[in-house]
Amino acid sequence: MSTTDFTINNTWMLISTILVFLMHLGFAALEAGLTRAKNTVNILFKNTSIVAIGLLTYALCGFSLMYPGDFILGDWLGFAGFGLNPGENWNTPSYNVGYTYYTDFIFQAMFAATAATIVSGAVAERVKLSSFLLFSTLYVAIVYPIAGSWKWGGGWLDQLGFYDFAGSTLVHGVGGWAALVGAYVLGPRIGKYTRKGAHPIKGHNMPLTAIGVFLLWFGWYGFNGGSVLSANPGAVSTVFVTTTLSAAGGIIGSMILSWYLSNKPDLSMILNGSLAGLVGITAGADVIDPAASILVGLISGLLVVSSVLYLDSRKIDDPVGAISVHLICGLWGTLAVGIFSTDHSISIQLLGMISYGVFCLASSMLIFYLIDKLLGLRVDEQEEIVGLDISEHEMEAYAGFQIFNVE
Amino acid sequence: MSTTDFTINNTWMLISTILVFLMHLGFAALEAGLTRAKNTVNILFKNTSIVAIGLLTYALCGFSLMYPGDFILGDWLGFAGFGLNPGENWNTPSYNVGYTYYTDFIFQAMFAATAATIVSGAVAERVKLSSFLLFSTLYVAIVYPIAGSWKWGGGWLDQLGFYDFAGSTLVHGVGGWAALVGAYVLGPRIGKYTRKGAHPIKGHNMPLTAIGVFLLWFGWYGFNGGSVLSANPGAVSTVFVTTTLSAAGGIIGSMILSWYLSNKPDLSMILNGSLAGLVGITAGADVIDPAASILVGLISGLLVVSSVLYLDSRKIDDPVGAISVHLICGLWGTLAVGIFSTDHSISIQLLGMISYGVFCLASSMLIFYLIDKLLGLRVDEQEEIVGLDISEHEMEAYAGFQIFNVE
Amino acid sequence: MSTTDFTINNTWMLISTILVFLMHLGFAALEAGLTRAKNTVNILFKNTSIVAIGLLTYALCGFSLMYPGDFILGDWLGFAGFGLNPGENWNTPSYNVGYTYYTDFIFQAMFAATAATIVSGAVAERVKLSSFLLFSTLYVAIVYPIAGSWKWGGGWLDQLGFYDFAGSTLVHGVGGWAALVGAYVLGPRIGKYTRKGAHPIKGHNMPLTAIGVFLLWFGWYGFNGGSVLSANPGAVSTVFVTTTLSAAGGIIGSMILSWYLSNKPDLSMILNGSLAGLVGITAGADVIDPAASILVGLISGLLVVSSVLYLDSRKIDDPVGAISVHLICGLWGTLAVGIFSTDHSISIQLLGMISYGVFCLASSMLIFYLIDKLLGLRVDEQEEIVGLDISEHEMEAYAGFQIFNVE
Amino acid sequence: MKLIIAIIQPEELPEIKEELLKNKIYKFTVSNALGQGKEVPITEVYRGIAHEISLLKKVRLEIAVNDEYVDNAIDSIIKVAQGAKDKGRGKIFILPIEECIRLRTNERGKEAIG
Amino acid sequence: MKLIIAIIQPEELPEIKEELLKNKIYKFTVSNALGQGKEVPITEVYRGIAHEISLLKKVRLEIAVNDEYVDNAIDSIIKVAQGAKDKGRGKIFILPIEECIRLRTNERGKEAIG
Amino acid sequence: MKLIIAIIQPEELPEIKEELLKNKIYKFTVSNALGQGKEVPITEVYRGIAHEISLLKKVRLEIAVNDEYVDNAIDSIIKVAQGAKDKGRGKIFILPIEECIRLRTNERGKEAIG
Ligand SMILES: Nc1ncnc2c1ncn2[C@@H]1O[C@H](COP(=O)(O)OP(=O)(O)O)[C@@H](O)[C@H]1O
Ligand SMILES: Nc1ncnc2c1ncn2[C@@H]1O[C@H](COP(=O)(O)OP(=O)(O)O)[C@@H](O)[C@H]1O
Ligand SMILES: Nc1ncnc2c1ncn2[C@@H]1O[C@H](COP(=O)(O)OP(=O)(O)O)[C@@H](O)[C@H]1O
């Protein structure tokens, strides 16, 4: 292994790292755009602080929980100690042919906060800031890395042959399950569901939403491309193609279904659709061939639209469609590996999906329960009506602009 | 050729690919920002769906029309078959020293949608969504790749020595000609030209416009830098320098002229100016030396301002200046190769410019004509006045904001 | 030294270059977002034209003033002649193992405009456009490169062992000192300080501000990562980790202090906080270890909040916190090298800080003084009240939107 | 015919709207306003500086009615607005209208209002 | 002196403005409003949910005129507004003005209006 | 009771607000408007095309007062607005109010205004 190849691989991994970093801006913009102007400051605050919290807790314990080396409890739980411990040769191919220890850490660290950010969208416009920050901290510091260790850390699911290339389940699923629990325990935003059925609460800034989606897509090339863990030309280029085509498929799929259903071309749906396609291909971007990846995307697009409508029918209020995009398409993507890749078994994939579901549901319920007892989860009615920007932050996102806060 | 060099080259090509991808966000933001708030959703919808359509049609047939290998009709038209067909060694230097088959495809695919996006700007605020999507599909799937094959596919213009490094003509020109036809056949937006002459219809969001322009500039480093088709240090760094200096020159050129003419410093003009410089240098970024590239940019800046004013005087309504930026400066850039590079002949460059002009004018007229018969091209007056967001999408881009839709 | 390594290094340097380029969009967005809607066009215009001016003047003389090779006056001033002069082997490892001549130039050129952009924020909403452009031109063309030559050009401070890895002092400090002078000589915006004390003048667009901050952070990976001047895996990954953790620390530090002081979680403060952490680590990103970098960030976060409040108490009006972020944290970062890195002496660091302070204060005062005599520095009261967009540019940033320009 | 101008709290608009429709008042015009009143000003914090905002966001309702409907209108608004006890609930002003015209039909007077 | 308050469709503003100027009415004040009326509500779709918007965007015109100009004003507006036949064209309300003051000159009454 | 409607220049709002408070007028409502008047139109340039904007940004003040306070109100506004000499300072219109209701307390008439 030439140090030169090592240098290229490492460079690509670092570039992927910052592409993933940019996804946090994508999430912030998307989430802010699809909610009301009166909660924008709150959303930006959450998403900015989550990044910091995620990175620091991952340095503190997340990384060594997720990649413990040896496991303590069976192959379920391990811990390599607090803080960062680059050993000898941390910066040579003998650590890993693809990256140095620090590259390894920083790439993984950027992923970590994502899980919490996904939750942020589903609980937006009504969750208490402090409670949410506390939840994120615990979820990112403990739940996410332990779950990750089962597969990427070489734990029991890995040994069973469960496959999740870049995190349809390990990242998007893990975040998505908590998003589901969060949206459920918090209940819908005031006015979302009336006797007459679901009443739309419109996002206030579509260009911002579009910026968010395109930046997420852009960052996804690091998310999936970096998960090759090297700059291998064949592998990375294949991943780029499947990722791209699946995103495109997601747009078409969501466009067709939403246009057909509401016979209007719905922007917010095709924007969700592209993300759906991206989440869908994430588990199998390297093992699903390009033609199939289009199909994976199309189906993701159909799923996300159906799911958004279904959740509304069940009165589960997810302002940005986080559950539909990350959980539903995450599950679909994980399953798709079993379907489209001959080397992986559907049953093992299902086993993995279920195990993660159980673990994430249980732990997020527990954490939300404890926080509810401790601080309460939801702002009071008056604060929600006035908007979190004024009630929690005492500032406005668009000072001077004339905005109708209520219809 | 070491596989290591192959890996670097391929990595750089993939990075360039996603830089070009980001340009689509740039176009969407620029176009939305320079038009009215009531058409924003429509513009974002167009630009998002074009990306998907462009990528999928390019996978279906565009790529093999543009790089057919052998030509069928003389050196004018070839077709390598539907879908993607990586052969043996698709992922080795023996396919190409600079990139794998999939890298090749995805890099080119990102370019494809650009041509249609350029048109989108020129026909904004009045074109029917369905008609536009149909036009884009046909133009990107057929016209663009065939035109491209003449030069980049090794066709007849290539053999004559016509030179277009990264697409002043093949991308911007091809898009620009269709933009001209589109703006012309659709006619101006209601209220743009009154008895008293041109009446400005103001863009609604300048920060969004600036975001668009800077992202386009950013992406251009992949557009031009990637067109080196390898990571060759000398070549890529030269291209970076010429590209940058020309963009800077474009800003200065447009600033001077517009400040002089309207004796006010005009933001939208210098933003167009930077793009003008970028389009202008695109054809010769590798063969024009840095000093000359400043000149190319300055002239592009002067041209774009004059062209915007000229088109208004001819009552050709181009809301975002797409024709001036992409067509006019594309032509200038193609010519500039003949002027500033000793290895290329002005006459051949002119021949190329004319051939592309004829082909693109003819084909876009034909397509627009057919669609007009089939679906009609323009929304009806009432829809245009109310705005496409409500009339075509039944949604608003800035829910809650108080906006005067009419002066 | 294999040409392959040369290619990787050069590729990384070019990627860093465009990351730094994107910071200019970050600055534009941040500055526009934290000021009033009625000055947005003006700010975007300034930031766009500065980029062009910075790049062109750096090509004209800046580069050869900053990297003169041999010095003329002692080790204080040198000049390698006008324009770009790639010598023999400009594109081979024999020029530099890390990059070609043109890569060298373009990477440095992107830094140059930054210094002026920093000033732009501090003088926003009241400075005359022409006067500001003139100031930037002189400052970027002459002051910045001469100052830079003392250290990066191998001048006297370099020989004394002064250390500034990526520019806490050479870029942020140099810009920050001028920002301080600018804010001071211009005086506060009308209405900022009343008998009742400081009166907030609210930024008009928080999402735009957040976009700006995240893009700056993103670009910083090129700013610091590229300053390794090669793709060395150990070095670059270390810089990525320290840079990231310091930014995260800055967010936490500013969050704690601002939350404690105003007992509200203040978005604009944590956004400044992340930048504070980035500026703080810039001088020692390669020599401060990750654990310490968190501390550096935390302290930066505390400093930026205190400084913002202090400056307001001294009636120095800095609309975007440029002085606090770039100057104060730049000084702290430079000092931190002496504190946290055993190889560098606090006293030399202090010497450097003082020398730059004296030089930048003197030169920026001189330039501002001359321009004041020549053109005047500040728009007249009526223009300021109406807003620079209308009075200087005769256009609006948000045509159609209903905005209250005054409380 | 009277013109009823009511300044209300933004968040009360949806409810008041319903009340009005219940009371057969089907037509009104709404606009945004800022109000200065006795109401406790809210504090905002921006970059560490706390400050009081005394011009608060309000909604302005205009309802033109025939005299016999005046009470309906007033009652609908009061019913909702009196819920909360704190200062700053708002005001109603009643002005005389001399003529009313329905543009569509050119009807005048009492017929035109509804 | 009368105050003419007209609620019109936003898209009619430019034409009405021209008409007014033609009829020698050179001064007026325009603001944004939302209107609830008999008008067929428009449907919007957001994330798959269709819903009716009954508060529609309107423009509110205020024109203060001396009595002899009232008809000019009304006619200019009606001329344009009656074009379309659908419901929801809008209304005109005429209120008495007791005094008018031109701030610049402190002129009062009839002279101050124009 | 009177309703004072004043159209003023946006930049004068802060000062006028202070004047009003000084003159014991503690309550008023402010909204955004565009005004067409004799005022010299401002020119704007967009993409090389210069054009005149005659509908200029104004602020609309509504002050309901008891008759004895009318002059206080007018004076406060005039004091500030007359500062500048150029055209387009704005106008004041005074309309009669027949009834005023404080929603919170249901007080009516003169007591309710302040
Ligand atoms: N005299 C008045 N003239 C104009 N607007 C008024 C007047 N009195 C109250 N308002 C409006 O009503 C709103 C609430 O009035 P306020 O005095 O705060 O309520 P309350 O009378 O219940 O104390 C104010 O913000 C203002 O917009
Ligand atoms: N009685 C009223 N009071 C206040 N505003 C009214 C009244 N009647 C109509 N309007 C305004 O005029 C607009 C059009 O009225 P509408 O009743 O829809 O028209 P039409 O009378 O032609 O059916 C409404 O949206 C509302 O803003
Ligand atoms: N007759 C009127 N009706 C309605 N608004 C008016 C009238 N006269 C003036 N205004 C408002 O006052 C503003 C200033 O009026 P203008 O005539 O320009 O000032 P001046 O009377 O000092 O020349 C106008 O822009 C308009 O909004």
Image: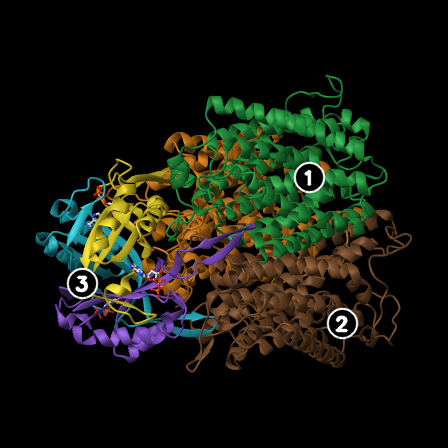
Chain colours: A green, B brown, C orange, D yellow, E purple, F cyan
Name, please, the residue furthest toward the top.
A73
Tell me which residue sits at (35%, 72%) in the image. E81
- What is the C-alpha distance between the residues marked 1 and 3? 64 Å
Which chain letter matches label 1?
A
As drawn, B286 above or below B15: below
Mark 3 vs ligand 3: CB below 8 Å:
yes
Q: Amino acid at mark 2?
A: Ala
Please tell me the numbered disc located at residue A330: 1
Badge 3: chain ID: F
Q: Which mark is residue F93?
A: 3
Residues at marks 2 and 1 on the same chain? no
**Can the viewer see residue C283?**
no
What residue sits right under mark 2 in the picture? B147
Whether residue B128 appears in this view of the structure is yes
- Say what secondary structure mark 3 lies in: strand
Q: Chain of mark 2?
A: B
Residue F83 is situated, as x and y percent measured from the top left of the image, at 19, 62
What residue is rendered at 74% in x and 58% in y? B56
Amino acid identity at mark 1? Gly
